Image (tube, rainbow, N blue to C red):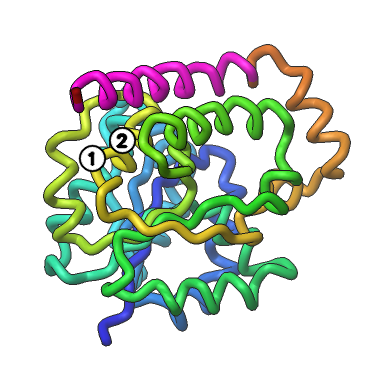
Amino acid sequence: MTRPILVMPMHDPAGALFAHLQRILPQLRELCAGAFIGVTAATAAAQPGWTVWLAADDFFRAAVHAPGLPVGDQFRELYAAAATAYPPDAVLHLCFVDRLAFALQTEHRQGFVADFAAATAERTPLLFQRSAQAWATHPAIYRELEGLLTTAGRLLFGQALDFAWCHLVARAGQLREIMPRVRNPDLSMLAEMALLLRGTLRTQEVDWLAWEDPFIEARPADALKRERETSRSELRKRLGYVIPSLQLLWAAEVNSQ
């Protein structure tokens, strides 16, 4: 069985995520055949040394996005490119460096490795979702606002999906079919992808999708959680993709009639 490929965006002007990526690279080599990385223009400009490091290692395939490209368009460009770069039956893990770094460097490592290995081509498309235990570690505004999406989807479609997902496993051929139909330029494009895969999408709740930021930022979890829960900018950021995602769910319901 061919080993899977990681597909990950990289926005890291400060270089902190690259340092984590370097630390977990030996473990990633054991789990995967390679990684396709989409580097933001700001990251490439601020971290030329790390960008060269990516290019020098044949484990990675890296592409730099054009300046000013909205985040949803960056993700769409990355996922579409990865879908065409590998054979149709290649298993792609659409995920995030900080989430992987957290899972592989904490008490969640064993569970993550087991779940990763079990995500075979036959089980795709597969959405790893945050368990109740994982959600309990997140700030309330994350849990409550993104929970609106899950609740709305369950009421509308009879399926509880994490539309603001963190880890999706799909074959390259499956992604090729849906990516031309993904349109939104913001993070609600994640909900678009889940909607397009909904008919065949499997789900699995996992604890290793607990809140990663305290570990990545080396901050006390309680203090960081209070900071995020009282931040108006954080609230606006979350609403910025939750509201258009809700509109997508409503449009899917209306168009189904």
Please name the amino acid that badge 1 sits on.
Answer: Glu
**Is label 2 in contact with label 1 (beta carbons under 8 Å)?**
yes
The percent coordinates of residue 210 (x first, y second) are 67, 52
Magenta span includes 145: no
In this view, 161 is above or below 145: below
The percent coordinates of residue 24 (x first, y second) are 57, 69
Residue 254's quadrant in the figure? top left
Q: Bounds of the magenta span?
A: 235-256
Please tell me which residue lies in front, 58 or 218: 218
- Distance of label 2 from label 1 (alpha carbons): 5 Å
Please name the amino acid that badge 2 sits on.
Answer: Gln
The percent coordinates of residue 75 (x first, y second) are 32, 39
Element type at mark 1: helix
Please tell me which residue lies in front, 66 or 9: 9
Kindly identify which residue carries mark 2.
74
- Residue at position x 57%, y 70% from top? 112
Kindly identify which residue carries mark 1.
77
Q: Quadrant of the N terminus?
A: bottom left
162 lies left or right of 35: right
Residue 52 visible to an observer of this rendering:
no
Please tell me which residue lies in front, 155 or 23: 155
164 lies left or right of 38: right
Element type at mark 2: helix
- Residue at position x 83%, y 43% from top? 221
